[in-house]
Image (tube, rainbow, N blue to C red):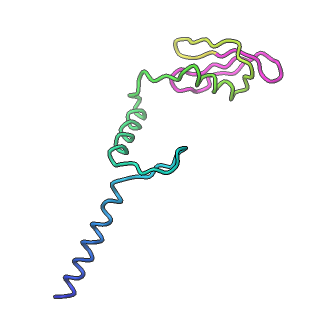
């Protein structure tokens, strides 16, 4: 009878100490390591689910993000940025001095064409 009490106490203690570890997450980012509460993890999961289903309508990349994407495609000097209904068109010059035009999708940031 004495051993069963000891086993019960040990089992209860191990469950009690293991439960809080499931209630939080760890995030490693530019500001270092931080503990993320469970509520915040659930909010992030809901956001990613909505985005995966395409419910994040109205989300568009900014002109600044479009410029970064265009520079990644080889634009060295930007002459103009034009926003159309569905895309940004960045016109400029590449490193060799040739004219270059990059079309970038307004919603996803995907490069549509480089000419």
Q: Find the residue positioned furthest to the front.
A: 31
Instruction: Give x and y (percent) for residue 102.
Output: 67, 19
Q: Nearer the viewer, residue 91 or 29?
A: 29
Image: 91 above or below 38? above
Number of disc labels? 0
Instruction: Give x and y (percent) for residue 69.
Output: 63, 27
At a point 44% along the width and 52% down the height, the residue shown is 26
What's drawn in magenta, residue-wise?
Answer: 90-115
Instruction: Give x and y (percent) for residue 14.
Output: 30, 71
Q: Nearer the viewer, residue 69 or 50?
A: 69
Q: Quadrant of residue 41?
A: top left
> Does 47 sit left or right of 10 as displayed?
right
> Does 104 sit left or right of 43 as displayed?
right
Q: Find the residue positioned furthest to the left.
A: 1
Q: Is the stretch drawn in magenta largely helix, strand or loop? A: strand
Residue 37 in the magenta stretch? The answer is: no
Residue 95 in the magenta stretch? The answer is: yes
Q: Nearer the viewer, residue 53 or 95?
A: 95
Q: Quadrant of the C terminus?
A: top right
Q: Quadrant of the N terminus?
A: bottom left
Image: 82 above or below 107? above
At a point 56% along the width and 21% down the height, the residue shown is 105
């Amino acid at each position: 009878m004495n051993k069963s009490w000891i086993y019960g106490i040990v089992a209860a203690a191990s469950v009690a100490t293991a439960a809080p570890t499931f209630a939080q997450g760890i995030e490693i980012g530019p500001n270092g390591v931080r503990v993320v509460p469970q509520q915040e993890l659930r909010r992030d999961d809901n956001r990613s689910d909505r985005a995966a289903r395409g419910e994040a309508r109205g989300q568009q990349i900014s002109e600044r993000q479009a410029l970064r994407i265009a520079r990644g495609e080889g634009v060295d000097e930007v002459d103009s940025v034009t926003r159309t209904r569905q895309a940004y068109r960045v016109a400029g010059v590449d490193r060799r001095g040739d004219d270059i035009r990059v079309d970038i999708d307004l919603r996803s940031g995907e490069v549509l064409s480089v000419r």
